[in-house]
Image: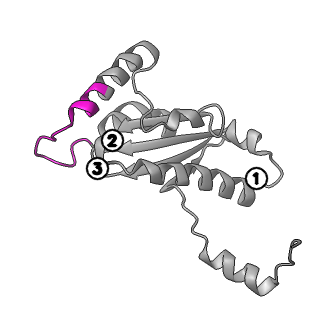
Amino acid sequence: MGLQRIDQAELDQYKKTLKVCSMDALYIKNDGEIYLFEFKNVRKSHVPWKELYEKAHDSLFVLQALLFPDFSLRACAERINFYVIYNNNSITEQENNSEAFEGIRNTIQTWAKAADRYPILWGLGLYEGTFYKKVMTIDVADFEREFLPLIYG
């Protein structure tokens, strides 16, 4: 059986079923540097990390298609910064982390001290230097204190 031609009505119906995810906020500086922000009002251990992968992909493709159609994905990636801001203080009671989570967290903290003050969580580091210029996962208090003035200053 060979390939069948897809009817335009079928294609239109298929497009309606597609779900596109995007970041919560977009900021474009005068120098062309782009910042995408995803805000999660939960502790870092409760962030729905699978959703972040969808948003990382979809946001880049939507930006490229709508704002920079003449740019390659690589050219877009060289100017886009992706921030995930979580809130470790959103829950007042102490969180019970698993022993495995504690081990992973301690390992990440060790790496972070050597490489960067803020570790890239949830495996999102694979997007840094590929889909995005910079990827940052950071608590809201640290973000407001250290990065907000740099971005909007």
Which amino acid is tagged 1? Answer: Phe
Spatial CA distance of label 3 from label 2 is: 10 Å
Q: Left or right: 72 with respect to 35?
A: right
Which marked residue is nearer to the observer: mark 3 or mark 1? Answer: 3
Residue 141: horizontal and vertical position, in percent? 30, 38
> Are there few (<14), some (14-19), or many (20+) residues within 10 Å of tag 2?
many
Circle number at residue 140:
2
Q: Left or right: 13 with respect to 52?
A: right
> Are there few (<14), some (14-19), or many (20+) residues within 10 Å of tag 3?
some
Q: Left or right: 139 with respect to 62?
A: left
**Disc 3: which residue:** 42
Magenta stretch, residue numbers: 88-103
Residue 26 seen in the figure: no
- Residue sitting at 12 percent across and 40 percent down? 94
State the image quarter where residue 77 is shown.
Answer: top right
Residue 144: horizontal and vertical position, in percent? 36, 38
Spatial CA distance of label 1 from label 2 is: 30 Å
Which amino acid is tagged 2? Answer: Val
